[in-house]
Image (tube, helix red, strand yellow):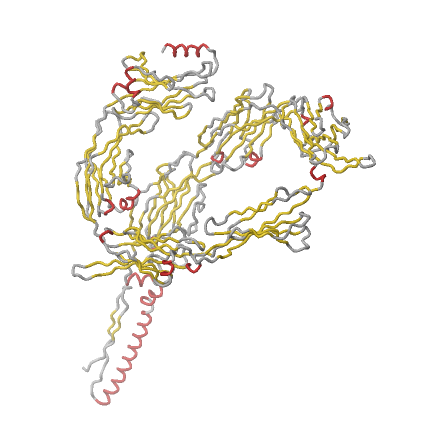
Amino acid sequence: MGVKALLIACVILAGTGSSKRVVTVQSGPLIRTEGSHVTIWCNVTGYKEGVEQDFEWSMYLHTAPDREIRIISTSQPNYAYSVYAQRVNRKEIYVERLTGDSALLHISKLEAKDQGQFECYTPNTDGHYLGSYSAKTNLTVIPDTLTVTSAGQTLSKVEGDTLQLACEVSRQTPQHTHLSVGWYLRSPNHSAPPQDLVTLSRDFVLRAGAPYKQRFNTGDLRLDKTSSATYKLTIYKLQPAEQGLIYCEAAEWIQDPDRSWYAMTRKQSEKTSVKVQPTDRDFSIQVNTDRRAYSSGETLELRCSIDAQNIQDRYFSVSWVFSSSPVALVGPSSVPVLSGDYVRREAAGQLTVRKESPSIHLLKLRWLRPEDTGKYICRVTERERMPSGDFIDRSKRSRNVQISVQPLRTNISVSLTANSSEVPEGDPVQLVCSVRGAMATAGALSVLWQWTDRQGAAPAQDVAAVDREGTVRPGPSALPADEGEYRCTVAEWLQSPDGTWENIGEKTAVTAIEVKAVESSFFVSASSRTPSVTYGDSFDLQCIVKPRYNPRVPSTVTWRFQPRDEAGGRGEFRDLVTLTREGTLQWGEQLQGLGSRASIDKSPTNSNLRLRVNRAGRRDAGTYQCSAQLWRRNYDSTWTKVTNRTSNLLGINVLKPVSKLRVQKANQSVWLVEDGRVRVNCSVAAQTSPDSQHTVLWYARKNEEQPDDAPELLLKINHNSAFEYGAYAEEERLKSRVQSERLSPGLYGLTLHRAEAGDSGLYFCLVQEWLLDPDGVWYQLSQDASGLTQVVVRQPEIRLQVEETESNMTVKEAESFRLGCSVTSQSSRDSRFSVSWYVVRPRDGEGEEGEEGEEGEEGEEGARECLFSIGHDAVFGNGNCSPAEDPGPDSRLQFERTTSDLYTLTIQRARPRDAGNYYCHVEEWLLNPRNAWYRLATNNSGVTIINVLEQVSSLQSIVCSNDSLFYFVFFYPFPIFGILLIAVLLVRYKARSSSKNQEGKNGAPLLWIKEPHINYSPTCLEPPALSLHPGSVE
């Protein structure tokens, strides 16, 4: 402990420099149960890269916080004190190294005495002390009180029965912990891992295992908590696949300070053995094959799988059918019976039919032919003996398996290579014909060599041949001139089972051979060991001339240079230095100071010429080339230039200094609400030279889901302090809101005022480093990008709520009813609302006659109709729908807004067709920083059911409501009755006069007519009744 204190004191006395080395350990306190397996991680950062770090673990008891107890070290084998030495030697305590700077302390079986403060210390590896070298965390050990109890038993069930098992889970932990309980099924022979039946997670979420999700959803699988500690498993409709060992497992979880959950202990109950007797006698079949497409000569394997219960005690017969033709029948005795041509193919070893297992039957066809293309079917018949002694057969057939067999074609590839395409005159021609892709077993090859002249005027001549048995048949003698075109033709042969050979294809390869003249072997090459140098360094250029003929023929060698212009283009070549055939040097005219910095070395044979350039500068960068001329001395002592050769182009780059520019890469996130201010920093951590200048470009990438999209340039600050906006800032109108500044040397800031949701995205800076070259010209040395700053500008939280209470109202026809719409909660105090009322009318509603032209015709049940809308700008009809009824003085709709959050709509003079379900639709609108309104949220109110009672029609109402009928009943009868009365009186008067005349004549009384009897009601309810009765004899 004293050494560590001394190290910390040295770090404090080192000065005011910033801390570099940081050791972090898992935050505590960590609460673990006694006897459990515990891990504690430890990381170190800020050290010199490339050095593996060591870790030393110690602990301090709470009763003696100043006394160190060493546990384990990665560098010292005998580091532990005696209290932990035995556990370390038994590997009960060990350190797992995750990476070079990260390790994990393991305590396999935690003991109560392990409670205390654990310290992770990392020895110094940097040569100086700077930073922190240790970190501590607290470990609390509590008793393991978790108990899981379920009585083990053996149960025998029948398929379809119900299974119920109970499990008691309890714990006495004083800390706040969660429990997870699950039921698991393991096969009796432990051949497969246990399967999850159903589990209750620590978050109280009930989940079923993948194979049992369907049964869980249908209610056949349940997990019920019947008491505070009892968990009951219920399985309805048991299936044979669910037999095995069923047990209960529980785990106790605690949440660590880092918000992660840790399972302190996990226990299982005793296992219950469940056997399920199947009751199903059905079976299913399936035909499997590796593939459907084959080539001639390949082997086809078809397997017919039978899926049935107790298959060993049942009898099945399997028949194979090909395109409606029987192939073979395999009975319960497993003896195949073949049909047709398949008997011969089986005798020739081309067909195999056998029973591989009680549930799998094999059909194998060797040496497939195109005639084997078609549909293959497996038909399975089960014969079962009934209690009566009779046999019944149940048959099933598989699906058609379509097999295609393609004729065999050769897959060989032939390549023809020569020792050289240009052979010196008189040398032998060596050709190699390579064949790839030939069949390794049943195939054979034959080869034919042919030659033709270059013009192709003469027919091809056979040079040699090799037949498929390997016999060489030499062709005609080679022509004197070997120059020409050589052809290699390879044929592939396949031997069928009957011993005949079939040519399945041939391939040809061609190559041309040219005989070189003497001067054709003359060539020049250029090379350099330092194609890239830095300002002020030297580089060498080597020119190699290799004449492959008489070395007494001299040559002239010249080094040429092509400089690069300022725009990166290439100028013209100019001669630097020439070594003549006599061995003298001639320097060029346009050297630009190269003559004082260049030197020439030549070999005694004049074959190699090395050019060395010292103190390279920017103007020395370019393309270098070596050219050579071959001269031949004539008989008259004159010289003749035979040929001219140039070497490859040799590019020399004079590089800028190695950049040390480094920009901070830390990523960060900024979350804010609209109309706030965003601040992003760009820090240059290191640069190449104190005289470096920076150009800072700010970029934004708005689409975070498409990282490959090019970022948009916001603005740019050049190294000469020139300022310019990017196209994106112009398009998004950011010029008035974006601000950039240099906060300090190497620190730049970007501020975005009045942020809005569209400003969300990833922001970063690109820093370019500029330096002065020796000629006094600024050049860009390098560039580096910063880390990403994720900016999330959120809209206000949606809190819109509308009263959702449903109501039922009954009104009489012609009365008014009121619909309310109450906004109980809003997202912002500046919110405005757009309110619309809708009605959903019933399918068969009764309406008044003559209303066919009115709006809101009834449609299908559930179709809604817009009644009224008012926008957030308080304009009627400017909401989210167009009302069917136009507003006006004759409108039956009356809108009121009694308070800021209460809207009402009154419908006057109710009609029967007004019956239906009414609700209001509310939209919440806010003003964004650009002074544009946008819709934030929507919500619907509860439904108000309106019933309209129709008025019952009576005789009085019918008469009084119709003007024509009213006049016909109460006005027209009076003049008609008057005319009738006058006519009656007139008839009576004439009758009396006539009776008097007759009485005077005959002396007898006359018949007379009584006065008409008129019944009249002065009301408008009944028409008057007129009765005329004939008189009687008096």
Image coordinates for residue 869, horizontal then vertical, percent: 41, 46
Image coordinates for residue 180, horizontal then vertical, percent: 26, 34
* Res 957 quadrant in image: bottom left
Image coordinates for residue 517, horizontal then vertical, percent: 71, 41
* Res 726 quadrant in image: top right
Q: Which quarter of the rendered picture does the N terminus lie within?
A: top left
**Residue situated furthest bottom in the rendering:** 1002
**Residue at coordinates 56% horizontally, 21% vertically from top-left?**
687
> Can residue 200 be seen in this snapshot?
yes
Q: Is residue 495 above or below residue 818?
A: below
Q: Is residue 933 left or right of residue 94?
A: right
**Residue at coordinates 51% horizontally, 37% vertically from top-left?**
708
Q: Nearer the viewer, residue 787 or 372?
A: 372
Image coordinates for residue 244, horizontal then vertical, percent: 22, 42
**Residue at coordinates 47% horizontally, 14% vertically from top-left?**
127
Looking at the rendered structure, the number of numbered marks drawn on it comes to: 0
* Res 833 quadrant in image: top left
Q: Is residue 66 above or below residue 848?
A: above
Q: Nearer the viewer, residue 713 or 950?
A: 713
Q: Nearer the viewer, residue 293 or 341?
A: 341
**Residue situated furthest right in the rendering:** 636
> Can residue 845 be seen in this snapshot?
no
Q: Which quarter of the rendered picture does the C terminus lie within?
A: bottom left
